[in-house]
Image (cartoon, rainbow, N blue to C red):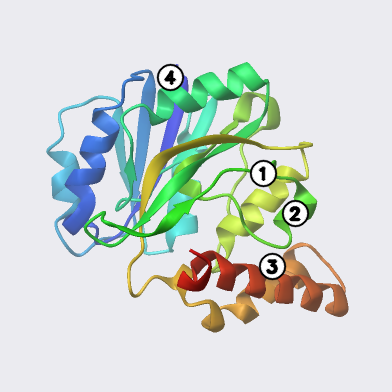
């Protein structure tokens, strides 16, 4: 069984996919499986993946287009590795990402870890200051802002089990992390920049004002908070999101 399972949803990602593939294949840590679920792409993504000659890469084609959370869940159900990590089909890891993360989790004896990451344009040119991994993460502080990025985080499924994504929510990653943090005391920061995140102009996560309602539902529907409590945390999330991405603070 592989020690690490990498989970990737893919949908019309052919423009950046080969660069992401190279980032995984060139990892210094080699005991991994890469589970890619294609969400019914209409470009050449599937063909690109099928042309890779590496038995560690396992492609599944979804029966229908169900979104990134649905695609990740398909891969998660088939994952066999102890450590679970995520990489979208357009993002990038430094060559020692897996090696550093596995070593850090074992050294710190923690169930969850995350690293700093670079925030880049579509050509991987830095656009804002690196997002720093400088604080422990807990359920309480994750309510106010989502410090965990999928591309720079890893958790130990042997100790906490697999955590699946709620399907149909645009904030599925935040809900998943909150549910995971209900099971553990704290996640630890690896204070190194180990990944690169592409900030697309059309990225859903960047259009904060358009998804305030979806964030409110994170608290109201998934955390089962009261209306007042849900509004309080939504306001905190919006403020922290502005500070996270505004050039006034970067």
Circle 1 residue:
135
Q: CA–CA distance between discs 1 and 3?
A: 22 Å
* Residue 211: x %, y % from top left: 56, 78
Of the two numbered discs 2 and 4 in the rendering, the one whose residue sits closer to the viewer = 2
Q: CA–CA distance between discs 3 and 4?
A: 33 Å
Label located before the other in sequence (2 or 4): 4
Say which residue appears at 17% left-offset and 45% top-offset: 18
Q: Can residue 146 be seen by looking at this rendering?
A: yes
Of the two numbered discs 4 and 1 in the rendering, the one whose residue sits closer to the viewer = 1
Circle 3 residue:
218
Q: Secondary structure at mark 1?
A: loop
Say which residue appears at 39% left-offset and 70% top-offset: 203
What numbered label is drawn on residue 141?
2
Q: Secondary structure at mark 3?
A: helix
Q: Against 10, is 220 above or below?
A: below
Of the two numbered discs 1 and 3 in the rendering, the one whose residue sits closer to the viewer = 1
Circle 4 residue:
2
Q: Residues at badges 2 and 4 in contact (C-beta under 8 Å)?
A: no
Hey, which quadrant is residue 218 in on the image?
bottom right
Q: Residues at badges 2 and 3 in contact (C-beta under 8 Å)?
A: no
Q: CA–CA distance between discs 2 and 3?
A: 15 Å
From the viewer's perspective, is 10 left or right of 111? left
């Amino acid at each position: 069984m592989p020690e690490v399972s990498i989970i990737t949803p893919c949908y019309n990602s052919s423009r950046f996919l080969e660069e992401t593939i190279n980032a995984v294949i060139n990892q210094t840590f080699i005991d991994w499986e890469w589970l890619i679920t294609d969400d019914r792409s209409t470009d050449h993504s599937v063909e690109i993946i099928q042309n890779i000659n590496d038995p560690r890469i396992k492609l599944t084609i979804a029966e229908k287009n169900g979104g990134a959370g649905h695609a990740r869940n398909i891969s998660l159900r088939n994952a066999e590795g102890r450590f679970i990590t995520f990489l979208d089909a357009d993002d990038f890891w430094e060559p020692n990402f897996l090696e550093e993360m596995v070593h850090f989790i074992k050294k710190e004896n923690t169930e969850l870890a995350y690293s700093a990451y670079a925030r880049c344009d579509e050509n991987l040119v830095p656009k804002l200051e690196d997002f720093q991994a400088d604080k422990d993460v807990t359920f309480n502080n994750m309510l106010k802002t989502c410090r965990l990025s999928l591309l720079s985080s890893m958790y130990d499924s042997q100790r906490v089990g697999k955590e699946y994504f709620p399907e149909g929510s645009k904030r599925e990653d935040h809900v998943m992390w909150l549910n995971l943090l209900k099971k553990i005391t704290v996640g630890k920061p690896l204070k190194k920049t180990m990944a690169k995140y592409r900030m697309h102009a059309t990225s859903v996560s960047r259009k904060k004002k358009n998804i305030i309602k979806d964030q409110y539902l994170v608290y109201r529907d998934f955390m089962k908070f009261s209306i007042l409590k849900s509004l309080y945390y939504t306001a905190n999330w919006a403020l922290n999101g502005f500070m996270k991405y505004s050039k006034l603070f970067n």
